[in-house]
Image (cartoon, rainbow, N blue to C red):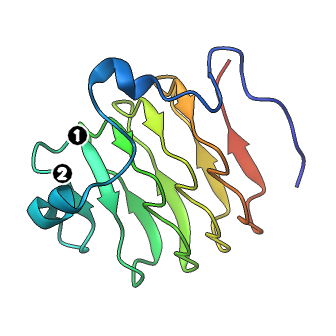
Amino acid sequence: MQYSTISEYVKANQDVSDNLDMSTKVTEEELNEAIPDEFGVKYSKDGRKLLKVPYELNGTYSIKEGVRIICEEAFLDRWSLRSLVIPDSVTSIGNSAFMCCSSLRSVVIPESVTSIGDDAFMGCESLNSLVIPD
């Protein structure tokens, strides 16, 4: 794996979602009110936050258009996830969002993303391509 710096427009470790009145943290209330998709992925009731992904999720997954926040630890330890499609609506990726997704091979971060949290991709041992636009 090769390492490079994150583009200047991305403010690492800064949660710009505060300006949107949205946090990357998941509350118990949000989980209780969550709406799962056909794969069991839990979204906030307004559809703007991806809250949690079931451990059984495998292969390729496309996040729904309209999601703005990928919450903290949303994909934590989802070792069978191989690829991910992130829509242009996403603006923030929470801390440890993809931590220990050991089979994740490549991710393209859309230009809309302005915040990537701490350790977002830590432990992604198979990740050989992380594309962050200029």
Out of 22 and 92, give the one closest to the viewer. Answer: 22
Q: Amino acid at mark 1?
A: Arg
Q: Marks 1 and 2, Cα distance to the nearest angstrom?
A: 6 Å
Task: Name the quadrant of the C terminus.
Answer: top right
On screen, residue 48 versus residue 95, left or right, reads left
Q: Label 1's element? A: loop
Query: Which residue is denoted by mark 1 in the rendering?
Result: 48
Q: Is residue 64 visible?
A: no
On screen, residue 98 versus residue 53, left or right, reads right
Q: Position of residue 26 (x, y in %)?
A: 32, 54
User: Looking at the image, do the residues carrying marks 1 and 2 touch, with CB atoms under 8 Å apart?
Assistant: yes
- Is the residue 56 above or below the residue 109 in the image? below
Out of 82 and 35, give the one closest to the viewer. Answer: 35
Most extreme residue toward the front, as rendered?
Answer: 28
Task: Name the quadrant of the N terminus.
Answer: bottom right
Out of 12 and 9, give the one closest to the viewer. Answer: 12
Q: Amino acid at mark 2?
A: Ser
